[in-house]
Amino acid sequence: MWAEALSALSAWLADPQARAFLQDPERSEEDKVQFLSSIPVEVDAQAWRRFITLLVENDRWSAAAEIAAHFRAALLADQRRIEVVARSAIPLTDDQKTAVRAALRRRYPDREIELREEVDEDILGGLILQAGDLSIDASVRGQLEQLTQTLRN
């Protein structure tokens, strides 16, 4: 639930109007706490308000996205799961998803794989996999960039 709450906070703070409100020196800390506390979340209300107050009092509300990412990474690690983002130019077929999961299970045998797909036409073809610090670029665009770099050197 906290992961979802932190994600909601990050999304809320991505809005330029919300950021403008929080950056307004005319707004009191209490106004800012009240504003951020109004985000609908499913966590203990007192704990949420204390967390929001801590962010506002220390002027760290802008770090919410980073906090959410670190929290999610710690949660996944604790649950022995790994989130993998698969970017491709077109949606993956069921067979391709199965093959990607099988390859990832060999690399991460003790982890449950959470495969999240993203379609990115800019990569032209192929696949880019990102899992934590691991990044595998098997895209056409990546290969063209590598070829261009090789030819320049």
Image: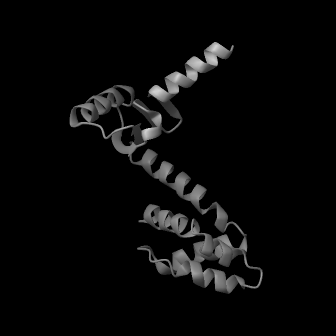
* Residue drawn at (62%, 81%) of the image: 33
* Residue drawn at (35%, 34%) of the image: 110
| Residue 88 sits above or below residue 58 on the image | above
Q: Is residue 70 left or right of residue 75?
A: right
Q: In the image, residue 120 lies at what x, y percent?
A: 43, 42
* Residue drawn at (39%, 27%) of the image: 107
* Quadrant including the C terminus: top right
Q: Is residue 114 left or right of residue 5?
A: left
| Residue 3 sits above or below residue 18 on the image | above
How does the figure colour the protein chain or chains?
one colour
Q: In the image, residue 54 lies at what x, y percent?
A: 66, 72
Q: In the image, residue 103 lies at what x, y percent?
A: 33, 26
* Quadrant including the N terminus: bottom left
Q: In the image, residue 46 lies at what x, y percent?
A: 52, 80
Name, please, the residue furthest toward the left: 95
* Rendering quarter of residue 147: top right
| Residue 136 sits above or below residue 27 on the image | above
* Rendering quarter of residue 56: bottom right
Q: Report the front residue among 12 and 66.
A: 12
Q: Report the front residue among 143 and 78.
A: 143
